[in-house]
Amino acid sequence: MNPLRTRLAAAALGAGLVIAVPAAAWAGPLRSTTSTSSTATAAPSGSTRLTIDDLRTKCLAAIDVRLPALASARSDVAANPFLTDADRSALTTDIDATTTRLQSLQGEIRADTDLASLRDHCRSIFADNRVFALVLPRTRLVVGADTATAAGAKLTGIAQKLAAAVDKARAAGRDVTQAQADLDAMKAQIASGSAAAGTVPGSVLGLTPADWNANHDVLTPARQQLRVARTDLKAARDLAVKIRTELRTPAPSTSPQA
Amino acid sequence: MTTKPRRRAVLTRRSRALHDSLTIAPDHQGVNSTDTPRPTRPARTGRLVLATVAAGSAAALLLAGCGSGAPARPAPAAAAPAPGAGVAADPAGAPGPGGTATAPSGAPAASAGAPRTALPAAPAGTASADGTDQDLAAVDRALGDLDTQLTDADRDVATPEGDLR
């Protein structure tokens, strides 16, 4: 074989490896990396055992993703300064119950030896818990609603201070027409925002996974209400800043002309 | 007759120049044009090994690029602010006056995440609402948290539950 043929053969071999190795890896069967079912007593056929292992691995992975998310949400609920005691208790109970169900399913799935039972348990991870679709967003919506309520209470206190300042400026002979109008608008925004936020916990805390299974939009009204609350409270906040600016601006001098 | 030896000398000088280039110096007499194997070049087997190693490296890179088919779904953090969320435009942690942003104070900001107006200092001799600076900073923090919760809830709802079929 002359040198040119040798080079061509080497190049062909290299190109073949580049194409063939990833293709083989891609086309290869998906094998379970866990050995939890290798001691299954039912001793099913090889192809069936692979299917069970595949499904078991996927289901356990689904649980493994949900449990840390629930733990994180529980920590946030415990540490949140705005949550009311009642809402904190309700959310914690919901998260704990979901966690317990998933942990129970984890053990059952590991012990499953027949495909039908395994499928039922896997289906339960989703249909009977709805961690990402219901439990976690509901937690955030309730936390957000209580946070908005707390912001509304703080804005109410600010409005009272601003009202006193407006009265003081009026008594000093200043024209406070615009500041008074802004203050009235601010109070209206606070009332509207607080009312919108106040409806959220009651509308979502009673929802169950079955409710979500029947209607995937069960959380949509609560999300919209919370957006309304956010918009109104931000408007109230900006009005507070505007009133302060108006009150701090020196009154124009009204000295009589000679 | 006297011109013959002189002409011969001139011819000799000219012909020497013509023949000099054809003369092989003693130093170069060992050089020939026969092909000899180059010692620094790898042998055929070595070239095959090198090609195989290169191809294997390329295959490993491609395999690494393929990765696993089904990446694990990231667990959403309950209170971690998402990048680009409203919190970014709302420095909720900024305390005190002047710490919060830039929108004109004339109109209420109706849009979520709208920049906030800076809190002006009270000039001497003007009416003011004392003690509102810290309250407004607390409101900013709460509204920032509200933005975060709404963003996270939207993200959760938008994420498929992932039921296995």
Image: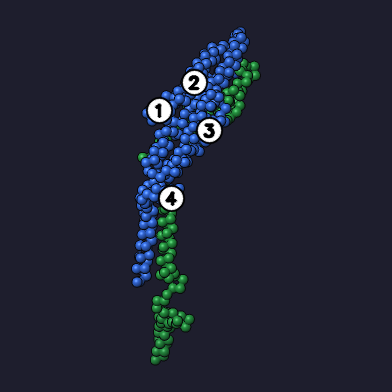
Chain colours: A blue, B green
Marks 4 and 3, the one that precedes in the sequence = 4
Density class for disc 4 (Cα within 10 Å; few <14, some 14-19, many ≥20) is: few
The residue identified by callout 2 is A198
Q: Which residue is mark 1?
A: A211
Whether residue B7 is visible, yes or no, is: yes
Q: Give how far across and how far down residue B16 sits, in percent.
A: 42, 83
Q: CA distance from mark 3 to mark 1?
A: 22 Å
Q: Between disc 2 and disc 3, whose residue precedes?
A: 3
Query: Three-letter amino acid code at disc 4?
Result: Ser
Vertical order, A232 against A108 (above or below): above
**Local SS, label 2:** helix
Density class for disc 2 (Cα within 10 Å; few <14, some 14-19, many ≥20) is: some
Foreground: A130 or A242?
Answer: A130
SS class, disc 4: loop
For label 3, the residue is A74
Give the residue drawn at x 55%, y 20%.
A153
The amino acid marked with disc number 3 is Arg
Circle 4 is placed at which residue position?
A38
Which of the 4 image quarters holds residue A105? top left
Pointer 3 and pointer 1 on the same chain: yes
Q: Quadrant of the N terminus of chain A?
A: bottom left
Q: Position of residue A10 (x, y in %)?
A: 38, 65
Kindly identify which chain the residue marked by label 2 belongs to: A
Task: Kindly identify which chain the residue marked by label 3 belongs to.
Answer: A
Image vertical order of residue A162 relative to residue A70, above or below: above
Labels 2 and 4 positioned on one and the same chain? yes
The span from disc 1 to disc 2 (Cα, nearest Å) is 22 Å
**Which is in the foreground here, disc 1 or disc 4?**
4
Mark sitting earlier along the chain (2/4): 4
